[in-house]
Amino acid sequence: MGSELEQGGREGRKVTWLGVGVNAVLVVGKFLAGIYGHSHALVADAAHSLSDFITDGVVLVGLKIGRSAPDPRHQFGHGRIETMAAFVVGAALMAAAVYLGYEALYDIATGAEYHPTWLALVAAACSIAAKEALYRVTVAVGKRIGSPAVVANAWHHRSDALSSVAVLLGVAGGLINPDWHSLDSWAALVVSLLILKVGLGILWSAVKEMADTAPGPEVMESIAACALGVEGVRSIHDLKVRSAGGRHQMQLHIVVDGQLSVVEGHDIAKQVELCLLADIEDAGEAIVHVDPAGPDLSAGNKT
């Protein structure tokens, strides 16, 4: 399990470093295009891309530490570090959304006028293409390695693409008809609300994980069904599940024939553990306790 986590960490860091490189090019490109293309919105979009460097750094640290093997001081691993990284990314998304929304409202209220050129339009289009491609690559890796921090960072890339969409619409509108100069600000306001929603979802998921919130009933039922499907398991009880770094940590008691030997009971428990780790999506650890069936133990299935 340790080597698998570390391999996933390497994949996550690799795609995050790719994001660092793309963001560096976009920040410089959009900033220069915004200045020479007379687009205030594109300069603000460059500032949004600059915030990606912060979240990229957070994710890199989270993956490096969060995916490292357990040690004597952290016997359950370092998964919560990765959860905290996702929390920071969600908070950064919300902060960026508030900033973009405030700027849009201010421009609408003051009637600010900008008359961008084709240079700004091309830069915005390139930003959309690059950030959407980066989102797709990053979210695929994040889901494959089960990393909430990498998935959250992927959504940060998409939020940047969405903000560039607002710039594209505003610039295109201004080029078509100079009287539509406020279109940029209204589009940016809508996009800021979408980014705010995504950031809140990521933040709330991280908070639930840090609070040891159990997964949904479908996950709990899948775990119970997996354990009960092992030959020799009569019932289960005291099933508890929490998540760390996007991976489920499962604890449960299984009831077996009280006449079995210790070795036989242990073998059944091992089969349950292997079943859970193989069949449950995002499984991280399974602790199975064996109870012998007897007159003082219920034979019913209690989860």
Image (cartoon, helix red, strand yellow):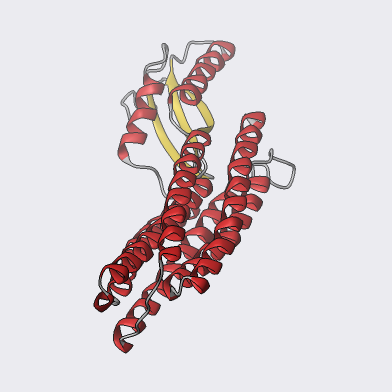
As displayed, is residue 275 above or below residue 72? above
Where is residue 102, by image quadrant?
A: bottom left
Residue 71 locus on image (x, y percent): 73, 41
**Residue 212 visible, this angle:** no
Residue 213 in picture, x, y percent from top left: 42, 50
Instruction: Please state which of residues 264 and 106 is positioned toward the viewer in this rendering.
Output: 106
Q: Residue at x 48, y 22 (%)?
A: 278
The quarter of the picture where the N terminus appears is: top right
Which residue in the rendered view is the most extreme toward the right?
72
Location of residue 119 (image quadrant): bottom left
Q: Residue at point 46% right, 67% down?
A: 45
Left or right of 114? Residue 286 is: right
- Determine the image quadrant of residue 108: bottom left
Comparing 240 with 263, the one in front is: 240
Q: In which quarter of the image is the C terminus?
A: top left
| Residue in front for this viewpoint, 182 or 173 | 173
At x 62%, y 34%, the residue is 5
Q: Residue 66 at x, y = what percent?
A: 63, 46
Q: In this view, does 217 lie to the left or right of 27?
A: left
Residue 105 makes an appearance in the image: yes
- Tally the numbered discs: 0
Pinpoint residue 19: horizontal percent, then vertical percent: 57, 49
Q: Which residue lies furthest to the bottom in this view?
A: 110
